[in-house]
Amino acid sequence: MSAIFGVHTGLQNTSIDELRSLWTRIEELPFDWISIWDHFYSADFDGAHCHEAVAAHAALALSTSRVEVGSLVYCAAYRHPAVLANAIVTIDHLSGGRAAMGLGAGWAKFEFDAYGIPFEEPKVRLDVLEESAQCVLGLLRNETTDFSGTHFNLVDAKCEPKPMRDQLPLWIGGGGEKRTLKIVGKYADGWNIPFASPEAFVHKRHVLTEHAEAAGRSISDIRTAINVGMCPTEADLQEQFGGLAEGVRAGVLMGSQQQMVDHLGRYLDVGVQQINLAMRAPWQLEHLEMMAATIEELG
């Protein structure tokens, strides 16, 4: 088994002490990745108790010593790409060279509206994402960057110091076939899609393969990852995901231990390279332990 296993930790309805304790326990188990999300409000539309992503990413870097520390994904509309690039470099140095970053177009209209951030039509949000990806890559990897776009402009821009590893990976999240996967195919080192069935993943990866080839790249240049839930019972599903339960059901491991092993195995059979357990408070640590046991059984 060559897949990478990780845990994607939501930042809502919890404390920093609880998050640190969770991250420490994850690192003791057979996981090689921990990531955070980027929301201002609870993602299930049920409140506004949520820690800020960049600060939490830095805390994650300082709370761990082994795992890759990522973000799935920063909303491109929330921060100027130069501000974000500089923050990620600092997080990379805090982590000793273990940082990864992700970008997405953003979907939580209620957050945009609450903070007065324009929630533009999809085309505009995807334009912002594409320009952000180009700016971030330039700043992280080039000595200087010039960029002239509709939404961002850089003139002889520098981002120093550089990341500790030469190619700090850029992830792009989402499954839109016309634009999002095209942007992934052109710019990303990693692609993440949440809560898709194995069959849906295969279809999306086929589309991504075509976009990558059209951009002169190969699908082998892009690490493919999926976020899954682990909820043995219907009550667990409702507790973890609330109003989002029906939307995520296809990508949630449910039922007996063997049923969950079989479901996870189907993702591996169709070539998913990284599988992240998506968790949010209240932290069901027994599910984390169950996922670790499932990984060991598959291995």
Image: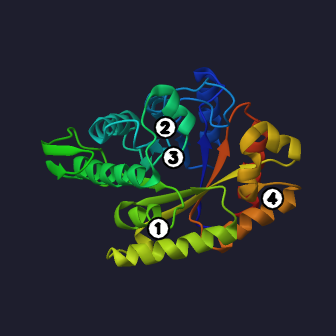
**Apparent side of residue 152 relative to residue 190 in the rendered image (left or right):** left
Q: Which residue is denoted by mark 3 in the rendering? A: 72
Q: Residue 178 carries which label?
A: 1
State the SS at label 3. Answer: loop
Q: Which amino acid does label 4 sit on?
A: Met
Of labels 2 and 1, the one closer to you: 1
Q: Mark 1 or mark 3: which comes first in sequence?
A: 3
Q: Position of residue 52 (x, y in %)?
A: 49, 28
Q: Do the residues labelled 4 and 2 touch (CB within 8 Å)?
A: no
Q: In this view, does 133 lie above or below 208?
A: above
Q: Mark 1 or mark 4: which comes first in sequence?
A: 1
Does the image show residue 119? Answer: yes
Q: Which amino acid does label 1 sit on?
A: Lys
Q: Which residue is denoted by mark 4 in the rendering? A: 260
Q: Which amino acid does label 3 sit on?
A: Leu
| Residue occupying the point 15% across, 42% down | 157
Q: Which residue is denoted by mark 2 in the rendering? A: 65
Q: In which quarter of the image is the C terminus?
A: bottom right
Of labels 1 and 4, the one closer to you: 1
Q: Distance between the residues labelled 4 and 2?
A: 29 Å
**Apparent side of residue 243 relative to residue 133 in the rendered image (left or right):** right
Of labels 4 and 2, the one closer to you: 4
Of labels 4 and 3, the one closer to you: 3
Q: Where is residue 243 in the image (x, y as percent from the top left)?
A: 74, 40
Q: Distance between the residues labelled 3 and 2?
A: 20 Å
State the SS at label 2. Answer: loop
